[in-house]
Image: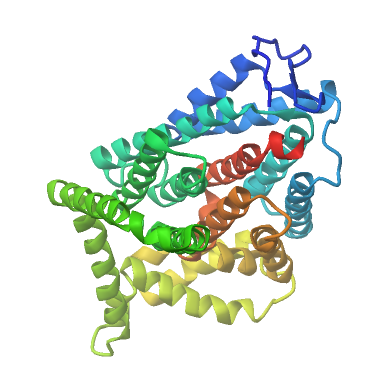
Amino acid sequence: MLLTPLQDTAINSTAPSISTQTGELRHAWPKWLLLVLLALLIAAPASTKVAGAAWLLIGLIGLWAALRIPVVRSANRSLVQSILVWLSACFLAFALQAVATYYWADPWGDRHVEVRLLLGAAATFALVRRLCLSPQEKTWLTHALAMACWVALGISYVYGRGTPSNAIPWAAGVSFFVCILLPLSMQSHTTGWRRGAWSLSVLAGVAAVLLSQSRGSYGLVLWLILFVGIAAVKQLIWRRRSTGKEWAKGSTPRLGKAVIAVALLALVLVNFPRIHQEPLARVQQAWHEIKEISAPSLPQAQAINTSVGARLYMWRMALKEIGEAPLLGHGSKARIAWIHRLGESSGSDGIKSLDHLHSDLLTTVFDHGLLGLLSYLSLGVALAWIALRRNLYDTRLRWSVAGVLWMHLSSGFTNTNFGHNYYGVMLALSLALAWILSTDETKEA
Protein backbone atom coordinates (compact mmCIF):
# COMPACT_ATOMS: atom_id res chain seq x y z
CA MET A 1 0.00 0.00 0.00
CA LEU A 2 1.45 3.34 -1.06
CA LEU A 3 1.00 6.14 1.44
CA THR A 4 1.33 9.85 0.87
CA PRO A 5 2.92 11.91 3.67
CA LEU A 6 0.36 13.15 6.15
CA GLN A 7 0.01 16.87 6.53
CA ASP A 8 -1.10 18.94 9.48
CA THR A 9 -4.76 19.60 8.94
CA ALA A 10 -7.17 21.83 10.77
CA ILE A 11 -10.27 20.15 12.13
CA ASN A 12 -12.55 22.20 9.93
CA SER A 13 -10.82 21.20 6.70
CA THR A 14 -10.82 18.09 4.56
CA ALA A 15 -8.58 15.26 5.72
CA PRO A 16 -5.61 14.30 3.54
CA SER A 17 -6.19 11.28 1.33
CA ILE A 18 -4.36 7.97 1.13
CA SER A 19 -4.04 6.20 -2.21
CA THR A 20 -4.20 2.41 -2.20
CA GLN A 21 -2.77 0.01 -4.76
CA THR A 22 -6.11 -0.08 -6.54
CA GLY A 23 -6.19 3.69 -6.84
CA GLU A 24 -8.99 3.92 -4.29
CA LEU A 25 -8.81 6.94 -1.99
CA ARG A 26 -8.97 6.81 1.77
CA HIS A 27 -9.09 9.82 4.09
CA ALA A 28 -6.45 9.94 6.82
CA TRP A 29 -6.76 11.23 10.35
CA PRO A 30 -5.51 14.82 10.83
CA LYS A 31 -1.97 14.34 12.08
CA TRP A 32 -1.98 16.88 14.90
CA LEU A 33 -5.21 15.49 16.32
CA LEU A 34 -3.74 12.02 16.25
CA LEU A 35 -0.69 13.25 18.16
CA VAL A 36 -2.93 14.85 20.80
CA LEU A 37 -4.84 11.57 21.12
CA LEU A 38 -1.59 9.65 21.59
CA ALA A 39 -0.54 11.98 24.42
CA LEU A 40 -3.93 11.68 26.11
CA LEU A 41 -3.87 7.88 25.89
CA ILE A 42 -0.45 7.67 27.49
CA ALA A 43 -1.60 9.80 30.42
CA ALA A 44 -5.09 8.26 30.70
CA PRO A 45 -4.20 6.04 33.72
CA ALA A 46 -2.96 9.12 35.58
CA SER A 47 -6.19 11.13 35.50
CA THR A 48 -9.89 10.62 35.03
CA LYS A 49 -10.10 13.97 33.25
CA VAL A 50 -7.34 13.06 30.80
CA ALA A 51 -9.05 9.77 29.97
CA GLY A 52 -12.30 11.68 29.51
CA ALA A 53 -10.54 14.13 27.20
CA ALA A 54 -9.32 11.23 25.03
CA TRP A 55 -12.86 9.87 24.81
CA LEU A 56 -14.21 13.34 24.00
CA LEU A 57 -11.58 13.87 21.31
CA ILE A 58 -12.55 10.65 19.55
CA GLY A 59 -16.17 11.76 19.73
CA LEU A 60 -15.38 15.17 18.23
CA ILE A 61 -13.29 13.69 15.43
CA GLY A 62 -16.11 11.26 14.70
CA LEU A 63 -18.62 14.12 14.55
CA TRP A 64 -16.33 16.13 12.27
CA ALA A 65 -15.82 13.12 9.99
CA ALA A 66 -19.56 12.50 9.81
CA LEU A 67 -20.18 16.12 8.77
CA ARG A 68 -17.22 16.74 6.45
CA ILE A 69 -15.85 13.44 5.09
CA PRO A 70 -17.70 11.26 2.55
CA VAL A 71 -18.31 7.58 3.23
CA VAL A 72 -15.57 5.36 1.82
CA ARG A 73 -16.54 1.99 3.35
CA SER A 74 -19.87 0.49 2.36
CA ALA A 75 -22.24 -0.91 4.96
CA ASN A 76 -21.63 -4.49 3.77
CA ARG A 77 -17.99 -4.47 4.92
CA SER A 78 -17.52 -6.85 7.84
CA LEU A 79 -15.77 -4.19 9.90
CA VAL A 80 -18.65 -1.76 9.44
CA GLN A 81 -21.18 -4.45 10.25
CA SER A 82 -19.41 -5.32 13.48
CA ILE A 83 -19.42 -1.73 14.78
CA LEU A 84 -23.05 -1.44 13.68
CA VAL A 85 -23.89 -4.42 15.87
CA TRP A 86 -22.19 -2.74 18.82
CA LEU A 87 -23.85 0.61 18.11
CA SER A 88 -27.27 -1.05 18.00
CA ALA A 89 -26.61 -2.80 21.32
CA CYS A 90 -25.54 0.47 22.95
CA PHE A 91 -28.71 2.18 21.71
CA LEU A 92 -30.88 -0.66 23.02
CA ALA A 93 -29.10 -0.63 26.40
CA PHE A 94 -29.63 3.12 26.77
CA ALA A 95 -33.25 3.01 25.60
CA LEU A 96 -34.21 0.29 28.08
CA GLN A 97 -32.54 2.10 30.95
CA ALA A 98 -34.06 5.42 29.86
CA VAL A 99 -37.58 3.98 30.14
CA ALA A 100 -36.95 2.70 33.66
CA THR A 101 -35.11 5.86 34.69
CA TYR A 102 -38.04 8.00 33.54
CA TYR A 103 -40.54 5.71 35.27
CA TRP A 104 -38.79 5.91 38.64
CA ALA A 105 -37.64 9.54 38.22
CA ASP A 106 -34.09 8.40 38.94
CA PRO A 107 -31.17 10.79 38.36
CA TRP A 108 -30.25 10.88 34.68
CA GLY A 109 -26.62 11.19 35.70
CA ASP A 110 -26.76 7.51 36.66
CA ARG A 111 -26.94 6.72 32.94
CA HIS A 112 -23.51 8.17 32.19
CA VAL A 113 -21.97 4.81 31.22
CA GLU A 114 -24.70 4.00 28.70
CA VAL A 115 -24.44 7.52 27.26
CA ARG A 116 -20.66 7.31 26.93
CA LEU A 117 -20.85 3.91 25.28
CA LEU A 118 -23.53 5.09 22.85
CA LEU A 119 -21.69 8.26 21.85
CA GLY A 120 -18.38 6.41 21.62
CA ALA A 121 -19.91 3.73 19.39
CA ALA A 122 -21.52 6.37 17.15
CA ALA A 123 -18.20 8.20 16.78
CA THR A 124 -16.38 4.95 16.03
CA PHE A 125 -18.99 4.06 13.40
CA ALA A 126 -18.33 7.39 11.67
CA LEU A 127 -14.55 6.96 11.91
CA VAL A 128 -14.53 3.42 10.57
CA ARG A 129 -16.65 4.39 7.56
CA ARG A 130 -14.80 7.60 6.69
CA LEU A 131 -11.22 7.69 8.01
CA CYS A 132 -8.29 5.32 8.23
CA LEU A 133 -4.91 4.99 9.86
CA SER A 134 -1.76 4.02 8.03
CA PRO A 135 0.19 1.01 9.37
CA GLN A 136 2.76 3.39 10.84
CA GLU A 137 0.09 5.37 12.66
CA LYS A 138 -1.36 2.17 14.06
CA THR A 139 2.09 1.37 15.37
CA TRP A 140 2.20 4.77 17.09
CA LEU A 141 -1.19 4.11 18.62
CA THR A 142 -0.03 0.73 19.89
CA HIS A 143 3.10 2.35 21.35
CA ALA A 144 0.82 4.78 23.20
CA LEU A 145 -1.16 1.90 24.73
CA ALA A 146 2.09 0.23 25.75
CA MET A 147 3.39 3.40 27.41
CA ALA A 148 0.06 3.84 29.20
CA CYS A 149 0.58 0.43 30.82
CA TRP A 150 3.92 1.60 32.21
CA VAL A 151 2.34 4.80 33.50
CA ALA A 152 -0.28 2.67 35.26
CA LEU A 153 2.44 0.48 36.77
CA GLY A 154 4.27 3.51 38.12
CA ILE A 155 1.08 4.82 39.73
CA SER A 156 0.07 1.56 41.39
CA TYR A 157 3.63 0.77 42.49
CA VAL A 158 4.01 4.12 44.22
CA TYR A 159 0.47 4.69 45.51
CA GLY A 160 -1.00 1.17 45.75
CA ARG A 161 -4.76 1.55 46.15
CA GLY A 162 -4.45 5.33 46.14
CA THR A 163 -5.11 5.51 42.40
CA PRO A 164 -6.46 8.65 40.64
CA SER A 165 -9.94 7.12 40.64
CA ASN A 166 -11.43 4.46 42.90
CA ALA A 167 -8.98 1.55 42.72
CA ILE A 168 -11.53 -1.00 41.49
CA PRO A 169 -12.80 0.80 38.34
CA TRP A 170 -9.28 2.15 37.78
CA ALA A 171 -7.86 -1.37 37.64
CA ALA A 172 -10.67 -2.44 35.31
CA GLY A 173 -9.92 0.49 33.01
CA VAL A 174 -6.21 -0.42 32.85
CA SER A 175 -7.14 -4.04 32.17
CA PHE A 176 -9.11 -2.90 29.09
CA PHE A 177 -5.95 -1.33 27.67
CA VAL A 178 -4.06 -4.56 28.35
CA CYS A 179 -6.74 -6.59 26.54
CA ILE A 180 -6.42 -4.33 23.48
CA LEU A 181 -2.62 -4.46 23.50
CA LEU A 182 -2.32 -8.22 24.04
CA PRO A 183 -3.47 -9.45 20.58
CA LEU A 184 -1.51 -6.65 18.90
CA SER A 185 1.69 -7.89 20.55
CA MET A 186 1.07 -11.40 19.22
CA GLN A 187 0.44 -10.54 15.56
CA SER A 188 2.41 -12.69 13.14
CA HIS A 189 3.90 -9.67 11.36
CA THR A 190 4.99 -8.06 14.65
CA THR A 191 8.60 -9.10 15.09
CA GLY A 192 11.81 -7.99 16.70
CA TRP A 193 11.92 -5.38 19.42
CA ARG A 194 8.30 -4.32 18.96
CA ARG A 195 6.92 -7.70 19.97
CA GLY A 196 9.25 -7.80 22.97
CA ALA A 197 8.45 -4.23 24.03
CA TRP A 198 4.69 -4.66 23.67
CA SER A 199 4.76 -8.00 25.50
CA LEU A 200 6.68 -6.43 28.38
CA SER A 201 4.14 -3.62 28.42
CA VAL A 202 1.34 -6.17 28.71
CA LEU A 203 3.08 -7.62 31.76
CA ALA A 204 3.52 -4.09 33.14
CA GLY A 205 -0.22 -3.52 32.79
CA VAL A 206 -0.98 -6.81 34.53
CA ALA A 207 1.40 -5.88 37.34
CA ALA A 208 -0.32 -2.51 37.67
CA VAL A 209 -3.68 -4.24 38.14
CA LEU A 210 -2.22 -6.64 40.70
CA LEU A 211 -0.57 -3.86 42.71
CA SER A 212 -3.81 -1.90 42.80
CA GLN A 213 -5.09 -4.73 45.04
CA SER A 214 -8.41 -4.78 43.21
CA ARG A 215 -9.47 -8.41 43.45
CA GLY A 216 -12.29 -7.98 40.97
CA SER A 217 -9.77 -7.35 38.16
CA TYR A 218 -7.46 -10.25 38.98
CA GLY A 219 -9.26 -12.16 36.25
CA LEU A 220 -6.85 -10.41 33.91
CA VAL A 221 -4.22 -12.98 34.90
CA LEU A 222 -6.52 -15.81 33.84
CA TRP A 223 -7.19 -14.07 30.53
CA LEU A 224 -3.46 -13.63 29.90
CA ILE A 225 -2.78 -17.31 30.59
CA LEU A 226 -5.67 -18.40 28.36
CA PHE A 227 -4.67 -16.14 25.49
CA VAL A 228 -0.97 -17.02 25.57
CA GLY A 229 -1.78 -20.73 25.89
CA ILE A 230 -4.11 -20.73 22.88
CA ALA A 231 -1.68 -18.62 20.85
CA ALA A 232 1.22 -20.95 21.65
CA VAL A 233 -0.72 -24.10 20.75
CA LYS A 234 -1.98 -22.63 17.48
CA GLN A 235 1.52 -21.48 16.59
CA LEU A 236 2.98 -24.92 17.27
CA ILE A 237 0.30 -26.62 15.18
CA TRP A 238 0.80 -24.19 12.32
CA ARG A 239 4.58 -24.61 12.29
CA ARG A 240 4.34 -28.38 12.50
CA ARG A 241 2.00 -28.51 9.52
CA SER A 242 3.91 -25.97 7.44
CA THR A 243 7.43 -27.28 8.01
CA GLY A 244 6.87 -30.97 8.64
CA LYS A 245 10.01 -32.70 9.85
CA GLU A 246 11.95 -29.44 9.67
CA TRP A 247 9.91 -28.20 12.64
CA ALA A 248 11.97 -30.21 15.14
CA LYS A 249 15.21 -28.55 14.03
CA GLY A 250 14.06 -25.16 15.33
CA SER A 251 12.73 -26.45 18.65
CA THR A 252 15.96 -25.82 20.56
CA PRO A 253 16.10 -22.06 19.90
CA ARG A 254 12.41 -21.74 20.79
CA LEU A 255 12.91 -23.66 24.00
CA GLY A 256 15.89 -21.48 24.84
CA LYS A 257 13.84 -18.31 24.39
CA ALA A 258 11.11 -19.72 26.62
CA VAL A 259 13.62 -20.56 29.35
CA ILE A 260 15.10 -17.07 29.16
CA ALA A 261 11.66 -15.49 29.39
CA VAL A 262 10.72 -17.58 32.44
CA ALA A 263 14.07 -16.79 34.08
CA LEU A 264 13.60 -13.05 33.54
CA LEU A 265 10.08 -13.20 34.95
CA ALA A 266 11.32 -15.07 38.01
CA LEU A 267 14.09 -12.49 38.46
CA VAL A 268 11.58 -9.65 38.40
CA LEU A 269 9.32 -11.36 40.94
CA VAL A 270 12.26 -12.01 43.27
CA ASN A 271 13.49 -8.42 43.13
CA PHE A 272 10.01 -6.88 43.30
CA PRO A 273 8.12 -9.23 45.63
CA ARG A 274 5.22 -6.80 46.05
CA ILE A 275 3.97 -7.80 42.60
CA HIS A 276 2.96 -11.24 43.86
CA GLN A 277 2.88 -10.82 47.65
CA GLU A 278 0.22 -8.10 47.79
CA PRO A 279 -2.24 -9.80 45.40
CA LEU A 280 -1.76 -13.11 47.21
CA ALA A 281 -2.44 -11.44 50.55
CA ARG A 282 -5.64 -9.90 49.17
CA VAL A 283 -6.86 -13.26 47.87
CA GLN A 284 -6.06 -14.93 51.20
CA GLN A 285 -7.94 -12.19 53.03
CA ALA A 286 -11.01 -12.74 50.84
CA TRP A 287 -10.89 -16.48 51.45
CA HIS A 288 -10.63 -15.89 55.21
CA GLU A 289 -13.66 -13.58 55.13
CA ILE A 290 -15.66 -16.16 53.17
CA LYS A 291 -14.92 -18.77 55.81
CA GLU A 292 -15.87 -16.32 58.57
CA ILE A 293 -19.35 -15.68 57.16
CA SER A 294 -19.83 -19.44 56.83
CA ALA A 295 -18.81 -20.09 60.44
CA PRO A 296 -21.87 -20.44 62.71
CA SER A 297 -19.86 -19.62 65.82
CA LEU A 298 -19.19 -15.98 64.84
CA PRO A 299 -21.78 -13.25 65.49
CA GLN A 300 -23.57 -12.21 62.30
CA ALA A 301 -22.73 -8.52 62.72
CA GLN A 302 -19.02 -9.36 62.90
CA ALA A 303 -19.08 -11.70 59.90
CA ILE A 304 -20.91 -9.29 57.60
CA ASN A 305 -18.87 -6.25 58.60
CA THR A 306 -15.99 -7.35 56.37
CA SER A 307 -15.61 -6.48 52.69
CA VAL A 308 -16.54 -9.91 51.36
CA GLY A 309 -19.02 -10.65 54.15
CA ALA A 310 -20.99 -7.48 53.46
CA ARG A 311 -21.15 -8.31 49.76
CA LEU A 312 -22.38 -11.86 50.27
CA TYR A 313 -24.98 -10.83 52.82
CA MET A 314 -26.30 -7.97 50.67
CA TRP A 315 -26.49 -10.19 47.60
CA ARG A 316 -28.44 -12.86 49.44
CA MET A 317 -30.93 -10.36 50.85
CA ALA A 318 -31.15 -8.41 47.56
CA LEU A 319 -32.24 -11.52 45.64
CA LYS A 320 -35.28 -11.78 47.89
CA GLU A 321 -36.10 -8.11 47.37
CA ILE A 322 -35.66 -8.35 43.59
CA GLY A 323 -38.22 -11.16 43.47
CA GLU A 324 -40.89 -8.78 44.76
CA ALA A 325 -40.61 -6.44 41.74
CA PRO A 326 -39.04 -8.43 38.88
CA LEU A 327 -40.30 -6.33 35.97
CA LEU A 328 -39.47 -2.69 36.78
CA GLY A 329 -37.47 -3.05 40.01
CA HIS A 330 -37.58 -0.58 42.87
CA GLY A 331 -35.67 2.47 41.56
CA SER A 332 -32.34 3.82 42.77
CA LYS A 333 -33.80 5.88 45.64
CA ALA A 334 -35.54 2.85 47.10
CA ARG A 335 -32.35 0.82 46.71
CA ILE A 336 -30.29 3.31 48.72
CA ALA A 337 -32.94 3.45 51.46
CA TRP A 338 -33.17 -0.36 51.54
CA ILE A 339 -29.39 -0.75 51.94
CA HIS A 340 -29.34 1.68 54.86
CA ARG A 341 -32.22 -0.16 56.55
CA LEU A 342 -30.40 -3.44 55.96
CA GLY A 343 -27.28 -2.04 57.59
CA GLU A 344 -29.28 -0.84 60.59
CA SER A 345 -31.12 -4.12 61.08
CA SER A 346 -27.98 -6.23 60.68
CA GLY A 347 -25.76 -3.99 62.80
CA SER A 348 -23.18 -3.67 60.00
CA ASP A 349 -21.48 -0.31 59.78
CA GLY A 350 -19.93 -1.39 56.47
CA ILE A 351 -23.32 -1.91 54.84
CA LYS A 352 -24.73 1.32 56.28
CA SER A 353 -21.94 3.28 54.58
CA LEU A 354 -22.86 1.94 51.10
CA ASP A 355 -25.41 3.10 48.55
CA HIS A 356 -24.97 0.26 46.02
CA LEU A 357 -24.88 -3.54 46.05
CA HIS A 358 -21.24 -3.96 45.01
CA SER A 359 -22.35 -5.67 41.79
CA ASP A 360 -23.23 -4.09 38.47
CA LEU A 361 -25.70 -6.82 37.59
CA LEU A 362 -27.54 -6.94 40.92
CA THR A 363 -27.63 -3.17 41.25
CA THR A 364 -29.19 -2.63 37.83
CA VAL A 365 -31.68 -5.48 38.32
CA PHE A 366 -32.65 -4.19 41.78
CA ASP A 367 -33.19 -0.71 40.35
CA HIS A 368 -34.89 -1.52 37.04
CA GLY A 369 -35.83 -5.18 37.08
CA LEU A 370 -36.13 -6.99 33.77
CA LEU A 371 -35.49 -3.81 31.79
CA GLY A 372 -32.22 -3.29 33.62
CA LEU A 373 -31.24 -6.93 33.12
CA LEU A 374 -31.91 -6.79 29.38
CA SER A 375 -29.98 -3.53 29.13
CA TYR A 376 -26.94 -5.00 30.87
CA LEU A 377 -27.07 -8.26 28.93
CA SER A 378 -27.50 -6.58 25.54
CA LEU A 379 -24.00 -5.11 25.81
CA GLY A 380 -22.45 -8.45 26.71
CA VAL A 381 -24.37 -10.40 24.08
CA ALA A 382 -23.29 -7.99 21.33
CA LEU A 383 -19.62 -8.22 22.32
CA ALA A 384 -19.84 -12.01 22.61
CA TRP A 385 -21.46 -12.22 19.16
CA ILE A 386 -18.61 -10.22 17.62
CA ALA A 387 -15.95 -12.21 19.46
CA LEU A 388 -17.37 -15.56 18.32
CA ARG A 389 -17.93 -14.71 14.64
CA ARG A 390 -14.70 -16.27 13.49
CA ASN A 391 -15.38 -16.18 9.76
CA LEU A 392 -16.68 -12.62 9.68
CA TYR A 393 -14.51 -10.34 11.74
CA ASP A 394 -10.82 -9.53 12.08
CA THR A 395 -8.91 -11.73 14.55
CA ARG A 396 -7.43 -8.75 16.40
CA LEU A 397 -10.87 -7.25 16.87
CA ARG A 398 -12.41 -10.49 18.10
CA TRP A 399 -9.69 -11.13 20.67
CA SER A 400 -9.70 -7.53 21.85
CA VAL A 401 -13.47 -7.52 22.25
CA ALA A 402 -13.41 -10.90 24.00
CA GLY A 403 -10.83 -9.66 26.50
CA VAL A 404 -12.74 -6.47 27.23
CA LEU A 405 -15.94 -8.49 27.66
CA TRP A 406 -14.26 -10.88 30.10
CA MET A 407 -12.92 -8.05 32.23
CA HIS A 408 -16.20 -6.14 32.04
CA LEU A 409 -18.14 -9.11 33.39
CA SER A 410 -15.59 -10.35 35.93
CA SER A 411 -14.76 -6.95 37.44
CA GLY A 412 -18.41 -5.88 37.51
CA PHE A 413 -19.49 -9.05 39.28
CA THR A 414 -18.18 -7.84 42.66
CA ASN A 415 -18.36 -4.07 42.23
CA THR A 416 -20.68 -1.39 40.88
CA ASN A 417 -18.31 -0.07 38.24
CA PHE A 418 -21.16 1.67 36.45
CA GLY A 419 -21.24 4.16 39.29
CA HIS A 420 -17.79 5.55 38.41
CA ASN A 421 -17.00 7.98 35.60
CA TYR A 422 -13.55 6.50 34.93
CA TYR A 423 -14.97 3.07 34.17
CA GLY A 424 -17.43 4.28 31.56
CA VAL A 425 -14.81 6.44 29.89
CA MET A 426 -12.20 3.67 29.70
CA LEU A 427 -14.70 1.06 28.50
CA ALA A 428 -15.98 3.28 25.68
CA LEU A 429 -12.46 4.48 24.81
CA SER A 430 -10.95 0.99 24.74
CA LEU A 431 -13.65 -0.44 22.49
CA ALA A 432 -13.27 2.51 20.11
CA LEU A 433 -9.53 1.79 19.92
CA ALA A 434 -10.24 -1.90 19.25
CA TRP A 435 -12.16 -1.02 16.10
CA ILE A 436 -9.79 1.73 14.99
CA LEU A 437 -6.76 -0.55 15.29
CA SER A 438 -8.44 -3.52 13.60
CA THR A 439 -8.85 -1.86 10.20
CA ASP A 440 -6.81 -3.47 7.42
CA GLU A 441 -6.55 -1.19 4.41
CA THR A 442 -4.42 -3.57 2.36
CA LYS A 443 -6.86 -6.42 2.82
CA GLU A 444 -9.87 -4.25 2.03
CA ALA A 445 -8.26 -2.72 -1.06
Residue 201 relative to residue 101: left or right? left
291 w.r.t. 286: above or below: below
Quadrant housing the C terminus: top right
Give 229 or 117, whichever is nearer the viewer: 229
- At horizontal 48% and vertical 70% (from top left) the residue drawn is 341
Question: Residue 308: image x %, image y %?
Answer: 35, 70
Q: Is residue 119 visible?
A: yes
77 w.r.t. 284: above or below: above
Q: Is residue 229 visible?
A: no
Give 251 or 408, whichever is nearer the viewer: 251
- At horizontal 22% and vertical 50% (from top left) the residue drawn is 260
Residue 185 relative to residue 332: left or right? left
Spot the residue most to the bottom: 296
Residue 34 is drawn in which quadrant?
Answer: top right
19 w.r.t. 98: above or below: above
Question: Residue 141: image x %, image y %?
Answer: 53, 30
For the rendered model, the colour scheme is: rainbow
Question: Residue 369: image x %, image y %?
Answer: 69, 70
- At horizontal 73% and vertical 59% (from top left) the residue drawn is 104
Quadrant housing the N terminus: top right
Spot the residue most to the front: 245
